[in-house]
Amino acid sequence: MILRAMVDHEEPPAPEALRAEVERLRAALQRAEARAEHAERLAALGRLLAGLVHELNNPLTAVTMYADALASRNHDPSEREKALAILEAGARLQRLARELVGFARPAAATSSMIDLGEVVADALALCRPELKTAGVTIERTPGTAQALGSRESLVQVVFALVSNATQASASGARVRVTVGAAPGEAWLTVADQGCGMDDAVRARAFEAFFTTRPGEALGLGLSTAKAIVERHGGRITLQSAVGRGTTAVVVLPGR
């Protein structure tokens, strides 16, 4: 490095080399400033979205709850169809809001030993409107596991995986959720019966904003889930084949 040579009292660098070094340092500074500005904008976006979601959450919950009740009790096919459309739209708005907040402002992880079965139950409660409108059934395999992590963050992971599996499934299909444990580890899987992915899609599945359903999703669910799992010291993988469905596997530190 030219600056080190100057400090070590070696032969002074040529003016051209010095100018090149100055330009290199200026470019590095500009990149650092751009990263800092991007981080600040992302933090501001996160604060804005968190406030927006907080304000929208109660009315959206009321909309989906009443639409669900109307769909269940109304025997007029046309009126029931309208209620289901409202329910689907409300559930989609809730999902998109959670994806945006999770991406822009990840929850701080306060780690403790938590029951993955309870995490799954919380996530499925949030997924209920989407599961109902999609006509998808959840099949939970009995099992227990204690994982080290943040309950709120891991609920978000399971919600994203189940939501993704639901969107890939046809009406009448099942999504299977399993939890288990091994020495020092806890794991969960979410398996669907959807169309599956080819190698090219699977390789990009965790990229932010990548989606095979343009106009229907932001493509942030899996990327956010991966970031959360990795912050927990875990790993997440996808096993998939075209026409054979997809299984998401999450492995976390455990007992």
Image: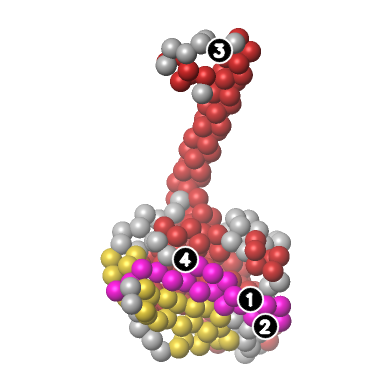
The part of the chain drawn in magenta is 235-255
Q: Mark 1 and 2 residues: CB-CB less than 8 Å, in contact?
A: yes
Q: From this viewpoint, is residue 139 visible?
A: yes
Rendered-image quadrant of the C terminus = bottom left
> Within the magenta stretch, is there residue 228?
no
Labels 4 and 3 touching (C-beta < 8 A)? no
Which of discs 3 and 2 lies nearer the camera? The answer is 3
* Marker disc for residue 13: 3
| Label 4 or label 3, whichever comes before in sequence order | 3
Q: Residue at x 48, y 58 (%)?
A: 227
Q: Which amino acid, by three-letter code, is at mark 1?
A: Ser
Amino acid tagged 2: Arg
Q: Residue drawn 59% across and 61% down?
A: 206
Specify the label residue 240 is tagged with. 1
Asked whether the viewer can see residue 82, the reply is no
| Image marks 4 and 2: residues in contact by CB distance under 8 Å | no
Q: At label 3, which amino acid type do we have? A: Pro
Q: Report the side of 16 relative to 33 (left or right).
A: right
Q: Name the residue under label 2.
A: 244
Q: Mark 4 points at which residue?
A: 235
Judging from the image, the colouring scheme is secondary structure
What is the tally of numbered marks visible in this picture? 4
Give the overall secondary structure of the magenta segment: strand
Q: Indicate left or right for 209 with 115 as reference.
A: right
155 with respect to 207 (left or right):
left
